[in-house]
Amino acid sequence: TNTGSVDVQSGTLRLLTGATHTGTFDCTGATLNFGGGTQNLSALNTLTGTNVTFSGATVNLPGGYNITGTTSLTGGVANFTGTLAGIGTIQLSNATLNLSNTEGTVSQTTFTQPSGTLTGSSDFNISGNFTWTGGAQTGTGETNANGGLTLSGAGGKSLQRTLNNPGLATYSGTGILTLASPGVFNNLSTATF
C-alpha cells in the first residue's frame, strides 16, 4: 500500500500484491509494472512517468494518468475512468483495456491489436493504420480507424462496438471477423473495403 510518494527513477518496480493506494506514483525514466492482485489508485492523484506495464493485475485508475512512453497491457485489466493527460503508445495483448476516461476520447497515431479486449465508453481515434489480428472490441465507445484498417492473421476478431472506417480497409488471412450485437462496422462513403 502506498500512502506517500513512490518515485521509480530507473529499472522496473513490479507490484504483485493487491492494495489500495492513496499516495502518488512517478516512474519518469523507468517502468511501473502492475503484476498481480487488485490495485486501486486514488481519484485525487495522477500517475506520471515514462512506461507502465499491466501484466496480470486488475488496476482501477479513477484519477489522472500521464505517461509519455508506453502503456503495455500483457495481462489483467486496466480500467481508465479518470483523466488521461497522456497514455503514450498503447500495446495491447492478452489483457483488457477499459477506456472510459472523463474526456470521452483517446487518440493514437497507430494501433496494433493481436489479442485482448478494447472496451469502454470512450471513443478511440487512430490517425494512422489500425492493424487488427485478433481479440475483441466491445463497449459503448466507437473506434475510428481514420488512417486505414488492416484485418489479417489467423486470430479471431469479435466486433461488439462501432468501428468506423473512412479510408482503405483490407482483409487477409484465415481469422474470422464476427459482428455480434451491438457491433456495427461502418464503411463510410469515403471508404473502400
Image (spheres, rainbow, N blue to C red):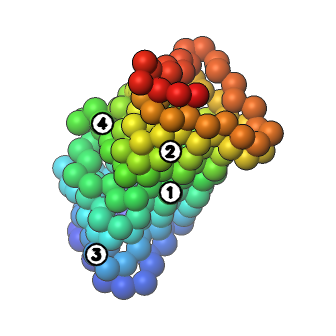
Q: Quadrant of residue 47?
A: bottom left
For label 1, the residue is 91
Q: At which x and y percent is residue 154?
A: 78, 44
Amino acid of disc 3: Thr
Does label 2 or label 3 sit earlier along the sequence?
3
The residue lying toward the viewer, choosing from 111 and 5, is: 111
Cα separation, mark 1 vs mark 2, equals 12 Å
Q: Nearer the viewer, mark 1 or mark 2?
A: 2
Q: Residue at x 43, y 52 (%)?
A: 110
Crowding near the residue tagged with mark 3, few <14, some 14–19, many ≥20 C-alpha atoms within 10 Å = some
Q: Amino acid at mark 2?
A: Phe
Q: Secondary structure at mark 2?
A: strand
Instruction: Kindly report the distance in space between the C-alpha atoms of the residues bearing marks 2 and 4.
Output: 16 Å
User: Dot 2 corresponds to which residue?
Assistant: 130
Looking at the figure, which quarter contains the N terminus? bottom left
In percent of width and height, residue 52 lies at 41, 64
